[in-house]
Image (cartoon, helix red, strand yellow):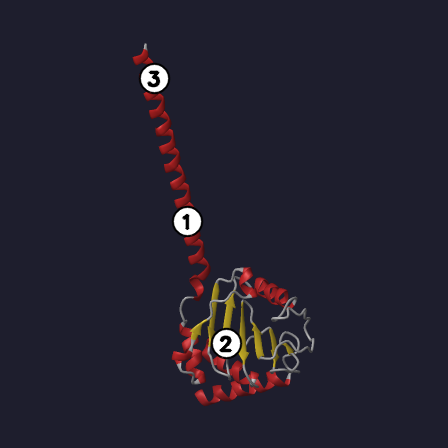
Amino acid sequence: MKNTWFFFIIVLCSACSNKEEKALKLDDLVSGSKEKKIKIDTNQVHSNTKSISYFVHLFADSLGVDHSIITVDSTFSFPERFHPIKTDKVNFNQLDLLAYKHWKWTDSIKANQVFFNWLDQFGERKIGLIVGDEVSISKKGFLVLVQDKSMVYLEFGRTFKPEFYLHKLTNCGFGKHWRYILFQQPLKKTNWIDCISDTLKCPLYAIYLKELKSTQKLKK
């Protein structure tokens, strides 16, 4: 009888040990799968900002900027909340042009929505803007260009000529069809160009078109 009880206790202990081992292995599998998901997500978030694109090199060449001073900007910016299909962000690390950012979406409706959502909380102080507002946003200068499916943001450390950069971007392949242009000189107030309705009335856009035509004549 004693031997029977002893055998029963051994079997019971063995069963408990197996259950504990199985539970441990299951926990290991779950925790392993969680780590894998986190790694995948991280790579997906940063996949668009790891290298300097061909276009940035082309743009830098047109400005005479040394490629060695260009660094990738990996900070998260407002337009990226809306899942652009392309993101290109770099720092030029010089006073004339501090930064270049470009985002592209699948269609013009989304690009337009992102621009107007951004205007609701624009800049470091998250100021609400409507088209035409003349407000001082930043100590730095900036130029925002909105196309059908994309948006470009340039940041400057001192006074700049917007028409010069419009001209350079056009020559690099962006084309001349902009929907909205918003810019501000350092410590000054914002200026707007509604290219949909004001193209012929805007002095800046007229200068830009004049430069574009003269370049085309030289090419011929």
Question: Does 100 sit above or below residue 13?
Answer: below
Q: Earlier in the sequence, mark 2 or mark 3?
A: 3
- What is the number of callouts on the image? 3
Seen from this angle, which residue lies furthest left? 3
Q: Earlier in the sequence, mark 1 or mark 2?
A: 1
**What residue is rendered at 66% in x and 80% in y?**
189
- Badge 1 amino acid: Glu
Cα distance between the residues tagged 1 and 2: 35 Å
Image x and y of residue 129, in percent: 68, 71
Q: Quadrant of residue 160?
A: bottom right
Image x and y of residue 165, in percent: 52, 82
- Badge 2 amino acid: Ala
Seen from this angle, which residue lies furthest front? 2
Cα distance between the residues tagged 1 and 3: 41 Å
Instruction: Work out whether residue 118 or residue 25 is closer to the camera in this orientation and state it.
Output: 25
Cα distance between the residues tagged 2 and 3: 76 Å
Helix, strand or loop under label 2: strand
State the residue position of label 1.
Answer: 35
Residue 220 in sight: no
- The circle on residue 8 is 3
Q: Nearer the viewer, mark 1 or mark 3?
A: 3
- Badge 3 amino acid: Phe
